[in-house]
Image (cartoon, rainbow, N blue to C red):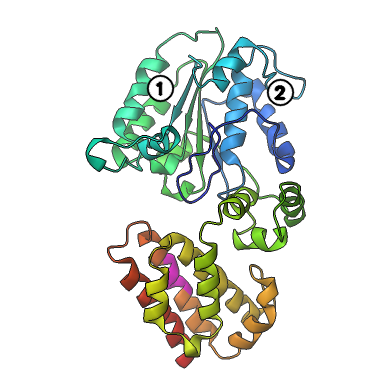
């Protein structure tokens, strides 16, 4: 199973590979934990930078019979073969049913959508696993992704397990929203920050993957290389983003109803993400004269910034932050987007 930790549930398969170029320092830091390994590690950082791949690599290395000098799995022993075949008896991956169904290409009977949450039953199942002896005599590893997908009952069930740790049982929790986890869970995990790669490292890697205009692709995703590659390969949302940006460049001429009608088939959270980046650059252009996400639109952003107050921009950014929370399940996507676009237009007319 290979996944990229993006905002939407992904269904990439896991392939044995080396670390991403920007993960060497994080890998060395993880290996440094081996001498005094805690019973739970929380890997946190921005989405789309490879946190899950890093955690899977570390899990495999913990189970490998003959790890390499740098700690990476040998990918040749029996344990590594089990891991590759997703059948290792000492490893458990806990994830939402929606992610498992996406991988298997399965749909629930009756057309019911698989849950995007990690249920309490999934966490309770760990209890039996925790009380078993390791098949290979070493560690047992439980990886929970994304950790913020646990519902309240699941989180409380996990807390009970963390409060009574079992010998040689390692929990790896992966999240880009640690603020959504229970403080008591956070306190029982060793926090491990996975840093976003530098702009130069991200661009170099995307060039190697054959991405056209990697600078633009990277900036659009908030400097997350895996998300940039995913969007470049799938073309997902490209048409909607181009349409939205064209409308945002001309707020005085914007027909909010028509634009919302055209965008309603897109993914709302992606559209809001683009709006947030655009408004961040508008605010930055007004206050500092610099832009971050749309450098090719710098001149236009500077011009637009002159016609709007910083207070209005900051207030609208707050509205976008609130809207993003509801973006996964809008009751009416068209009206939802209409309201945001009209608010954007109004901050210029004001």
Give the secondary structure at mark 1: loop
Kindly indicate the quadrant of the structure image that contains residue 183: top left
Q: Which residues are magenta?
A: 317-321
In the picture provided, is 112 more to the left or to the right than 219?
Answer: left
Residue 320 belongs to magenta span: yes
Residue 311 part of the magenta-drawn span:
no
Q: Residue at x 74, y 54 (%)?
A: 203
Left-right relation of 317 to 34: left
Q: Is residue 197 above or below residue 67?
A: below
Q: Where is mark 2, residue-wise? A: 71
> Label 1: few (<14), some or many (≥20) within 10 Å?
few
On the image, numbered disc 1 is attached to which residue?
164
> Residue 237 placed where, x, y %?
51, 61
Residue at image coords 56%, 52%: 234
- 34 over 183 or under it: above or below: above
Between 153 and 61, the residue placed more toward the observer is 61
Give the quarter of the figure containing the C terminus. bottom left
């Amino acid at each position: 199973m290979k996944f990229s930790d993006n905002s939407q549930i992904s269904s990439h398969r896991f392939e044995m590979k080396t670390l991403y170029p920007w993960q060497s320092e994080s890998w060395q830091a993880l290996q440094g934990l081996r001498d005094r390994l805690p019973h739970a590690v929380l890997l946190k950082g921005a989405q789309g930078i490879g946190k899950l791949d890093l955690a899977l690599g570390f899990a495999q290395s913990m189970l490998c019979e003959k790890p390499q000098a740098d700690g990476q799995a040998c990918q040749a022993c029996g344990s590594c073969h089990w891991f590759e075949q997703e059948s290792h008896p000492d490893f458990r991956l806990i994830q939402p049913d929606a992610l498992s169904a996406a991988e298997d290409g399965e749909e629930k009977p009756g057309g019911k959508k698989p849950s995007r949450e990690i249920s309490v039953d999934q966490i309770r199942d760990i209890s039996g696993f925790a009380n078993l002896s390791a098949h290979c005599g070493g560690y047992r590893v439980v990886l929970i992704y994304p950790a913020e997908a646990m519902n309240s009952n699941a989180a409380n069930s996990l807390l009970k397990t963390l409060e009574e740790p079992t010998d040689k049982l390692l929990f790896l929790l992966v999240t880009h929203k640690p603020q959504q986890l229970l403080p008591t869970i956070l306190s029982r995990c060793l926090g491990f920050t996975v840093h976003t790669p530098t702009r130069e490292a991200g661009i170099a890697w995307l060039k190697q993957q054959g991405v056209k205009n990697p600078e633009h692709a990277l900036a659009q995703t908030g400097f997350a290389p895996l998300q940039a590659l995913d969007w470049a390969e799938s073309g997902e949302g490209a048409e909607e983003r181009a349409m939205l940006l064209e409308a945002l460049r001309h707020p005085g001429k914007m027909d909010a109803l028509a634009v919302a009608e055209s965008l309603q088939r897109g993914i709302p959270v992606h559209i809001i993400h683009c709006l947030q980046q655009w408004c961040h650059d508008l605010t930055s252009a007004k206050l500092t004269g610099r832009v971050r996400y749309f450098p090719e639109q710098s001149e236009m952003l500077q011009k637009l910034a002159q016609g709007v107050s910083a207070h209005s921009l900051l207030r609208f950014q707050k509205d976008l932050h609130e809207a993003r929370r509801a973006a996964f399940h809008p009751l009416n996507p068209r009206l939802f987007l209409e309201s945001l676009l009209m608010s954007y237009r109004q901050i210029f007319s004001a």
